[in-house]
Amino acid sequence: MAAISGLIRVMEKAARKAGGRLRRDFGEVEHLQVSRKGPSDFVSKADEAAERVLWDELRAARPDWGFLLEEGGEIEGDPDKPRFIIDPLDGTSNFLHGIPHFAISIAVQEPKLGGGGWGDVVAGMVYQPITDETFWAEKSRGAWLHDGRLRVSGRRKLDDALISTGMPYQGHGNFDEWLKIYGKLGPQIAGVRRFGSAALDLAWVAAGRYDGFWESDLSPWDTAAGCLLVREAGGFVTDYRGRSQAICAEQVIAGNDPLHSRLHKIIAEALK
């Protein structure tokens, strides 16, 4: 096992503290399902409270670093220091409906050398509070689930592959684009899963539970940690044109080498 760095320990401490609160709030959501008001307002507050815990913990440990927060937006720090990219509750709809599949995502992104924007993601963590699973990675040090090394799936054939995705829904995503891709891909694969958390989808690709993943119309906090996890587990992450970026969010294809290549080719053909 790789020695756990101080940075990963800081991130895990913050994630576990926020995750404990989310677990308690999740129990309350299940009771609120039968109320007249419904759980929506409560979940919004749970999301914001988790983000505040993460902010407080990480800021105390790295006071001069910046933040990119799903709820709080961008908070500038020392321009020569990294920033945290945080989604305090990825899988909000699952949480809202009492479905125990959601995660906290934390990534660390370095500034570009010489200034002018942001460069590589050098650390990432996806923490699933209900199962108490911590997926983490650091650049050039591999991807891990607790103290076990992660490797992407070794499957090479599409007809053996289980692929995850996110589907368009009201006000989000491109229905025509998704249908074109699924129309080409669906008949060639063993199955498709849509579980509602891109951060966990990518972590599960890194762990070999899924063989691949595609989705579009995401945000950096959805994918920043997951992209690093897949790459450090030996996989590939690109956009639909095959470009490898530090954070793929607008368009994401992830998988091992042969399956990523096949997914990229099918998606490119579908969108001609």
Image (cartoon, helix red, strand yellow):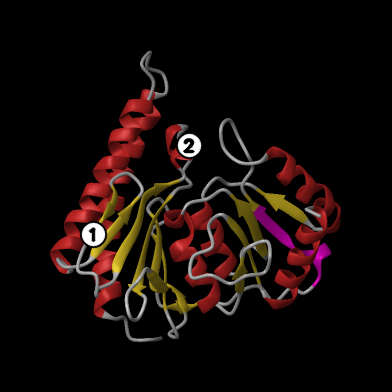
**Residue 50 coordinates in the image, percent (x, y):** 27, 47
Dot 1 alpha-carbon crowd within 10 angstroms: few under 14, some 14 to 19, many 20 or more: few
At label 2, which amino acid type do we have?
Ser
Query: Quarter of the image containing the C terminus?
Result: bottom right
Q: Which sits earlier in the primary sequence, circle 2 or circle 1?
A: 1
Which quadrant, please, contains the N terminus? Answer: bottom left
Most extreme residue toward the top is 36
Depth check, front residue: 48 or 81: 81
Image-quadrant location for residue 157? bottom right
Q: Is residue 258 above or below residue 30?
A: below
Residue 159 horizontal/vertical position (percent):
83, 63
The spot of residue 32 in percent (x, y) is 36, 24
**Part of the protein shown in magenta:** 157-164
Q: Is residue 37 above or below residue 50?
A: above
**For this rendering, which residue is in front, 202 or 174?**
174
Q: Is residue 81 left or right of residue 204?
A: left
Is 184 on the left or on the right of 81, as rendered? Answer: right
Percent of width and height locating residue 270: 81, 54
Rendered image: mark on residue 140: none
The residue that mark 1 highlights is: 76
**159 falls in the magenta region:** yes
Residue type (three-letter) at the residue carrying disc 1: Glu
Residue matched to label 2:
93
Q: CA distance from mark 2 to mark 1?
A: 29 Å
Which class describes the residues within 10 Å of circle 2: few (<14), some (14-19), or many (20+)? Answer: some
Horizontally, residue 264 falls left or right of residue 196, namely: right
